[in-house]
Image: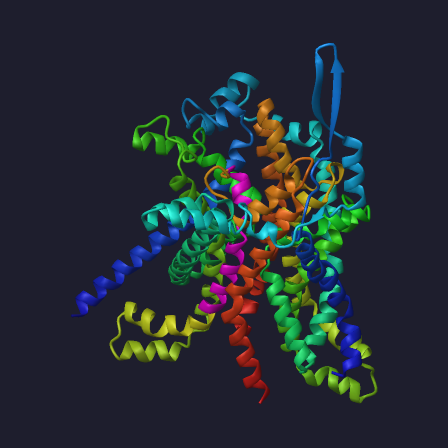
Amino acid sequence: MTKQTKRRVTFGRIISLSLVCTWLCLAAFPFIWTFWGSFKVQSDFFSKADWMNALWGTNTLEQTGSAFTSSGYQGAWVIEKFWENFLNTGIVVLSTVVVSLTFGTLGGYALARSGFRYAFWILMAALVFRAMPHITLVSGYLLPFFEWNIWGHLPTTIIVLVAINQPFTLWMLHSFFLNIPKDMDESAMIDGCSRFQAFRLVIVPVMWPGVITTGLFSFLLAYNDFAVTAMLLSEENETIIPAINSFLGTTQVEGKVMYAVAAVVSATAPLFVLILFFQRQIVSGLTAGAVKG
Amino acid sequence: MKHRAFFWFILPTLAAMTLFIALPIVSVFVQSLYVQHEQVLVISENCGPFGCKQSTSVDIAATEKLREEAPLGQFNGFGTYSNRSHLAFAEVGAAWATSDTIDAFWDEVVNLPFYGALTFTLTYTAAVTPLVLLLGLAIAIGVNSLPSILKGPSIFVSLLPFLVTPLVGSLILFWMVDSDGVIGAIIQLIFDDPNLSLKASAALTWTMLILYGVWHTLPFSFIVFYAGLQTVPLETLEAAQVDGATKWQRTIYVVVPHLVPLISFVTLMLLMDNFRVFEPIVSFSAEAHARSLSWIIFNDLRESGNPLYGSAGATSMLTILGVVFLLTPVLIRTWRDFKGAGR
């Protein structure tokens, strides 16, 4: 009996370990492969003859004299001026994060401290807004934005991304502020602070862990967005994600797919660094909504 | 909190959401009631030595003027909703009347743009969500039993597919499964068919997109469940062990019930995110075989030179209705909880 139980345990363990190993390989391999391949020429990375070429760089060696080439990166960053798109992304993402956190902390705090029925309805509306595909909203923006002549500019996109970000930010900060004891700001108000003073002097100093976590997700939403930025930005104001997409259209014809590969690797790099430094905050943020139910 | 203070605190976020989420929904609805102007045609008569000929030409200036005066187009009521590209009542009715079997009827309906996209979106959502829930739970239990030095790195690696930009992540996978890529080449080798391409058939394209969806969203359920596993009460587990429960029984009867509230949260998030599937179709250029609701809206808006705002608006309204329908159970439950808490 004991023997049987023991064997069963080890068998289950082997299955679960091999599942974990398979998953980790599946998760990491595409990134490693594409990173490695981005330093090869196209005939190696998309090898018609033998996929092993991408590992050893047979054609890369033939064409450039070395097993690694940075021509993809040079093509993307210098010739196709990818750095301009990177700059635009920097502006859009940074402004979106700052504005949406400002709006979100104020709103989230108010919702967490108000027991009235309308607070509940605002949260419910936010949930529905959060679920709506972004592209459905974009189709409502285009005509008015063309009419008012504000289509294509960075500030327009920033405010739209802020708005799309609000439902999520509100929910996240609302549940975070619920965890800060009410007594803290209420005792400050008994001491004669106004509501805003209590918020600024008592709540602001202790809210940063929650704000940083929420900020990471606002960053990801703005950085990863394709539907809004692709439809609302003119060509000279394009951020990196729509730029990569329009890259594909033009480069495949000219046989410069490696530019796109290099651009894709460049676009992944900031996310990689982000996870490296903020892994704990990201994990706690993902589960924050869950704990509250 | 007093009403007044609440108002000032909530004002910025409420203004942003009203202006850029609520009003656009109204604008989408209004848009969907109009169709774009038809081109103004001029019929002119050319008389020559061999008699008179009538020729039709487009009056570009007049068309432009019309478009400028009324950019919304002309009023069409609910006509756009019922036309062939959307709910297609006439076509569905005709298909019902002419086809003998349910299968034949279904084949015809799925060929209509809206129903085709709806079918793909729902299939994708219904396939990805349970797969991700199950695998995420299994991997969370697996990682939880790893030595603690390996836990951090495995979470780091797992976060990559989830946080990577969807367009970029699906491109990375697409380049690998493309017939010249490494996975594509290996698949050709296995099946010994040099012309095998994952893009060739609808079934393979759908499978590819669903596998991408699992790859992309699995880390989310894994991490939430993993965090949930840290809070399983040890005493209950030990008590079960004392009672002679095997590891499998402990998982099924102690761990899983503890995670049930998390499961409903993860399901809700997954449903919302999977229903808007869009980027992988662009990256995989899979539109020949698989179109989602988001993709057909995008396509209408991208219609070069002459975007179909009315058509995009109608599809958007139908999609929003779909989302509300999907969320109704959650909304009702939350409302009950709220009322219960209030008493």
Q: Nearer the viewer, residue A68 or B285?
A: B285
In-image side of B187 versus A109 (left or right)? left
Tell me the residue at 55%/21% (across/down). A66
Residue B220: where, in percent of width, then height? 50, 58
Q: Quadrant of the N terminus of chain B?
A: bottom right
When the figure is inspected, residue B83 is found, relative to residue A184, above or below; the finding is: above
Q: Say if the magenta span includes residue A73.
A: no
Residue A56: where, in percent of width, then height? 46, 26
Tell me the residue at 60%/51% (across/down). B79
How is the structure coloured here?
A: rainbow
| Figure disc tally | 0
In-image side of B136 versus B23 (left or right)? left
Q: Residue furthest top?
A: B49
Q: Quadrant of residue A268?
A: top right
Residue B266: where, in percent of width, then height? 48, 64
Q: Nearer the viewer, residue B296 or B42?
A: B42
When the figure is inspected, residue B306 is found, relative to residue A69, above or below; the finding is: below
Q: Nearer the viewer, residue A49 or B141?
A: A49
User: Is residue A70 visible to us here?
Assistant: no
Provide the residue span drawn in magenta. Answer: B263-285
In-image side of A212 versus B244 (left or right)? right
Q: Nearer the viewer, residue B96 or A263?
A: B96
When the figure is inspected, residue B224 is found, relative to residue B302, above or below; the finding is: below
Tell me the residue at 34%/55% (across/down). A17
Q: Quadrant of the C terminus of chain B?
A: bottom right
Q: Residue furthest front?
A: B51
Residue A215: where, in percent of width, then height? 67, 60
Q: Quadrant of residue A101?
A: bottom right
User: Is residue B208 visible to us here?
Assistant: yes
In-image side of A234 versus A31 (left or right)? right
The dominant secondary structure in magenta is helix
Q: Say if the magenta span includes residue B282.
A: yes
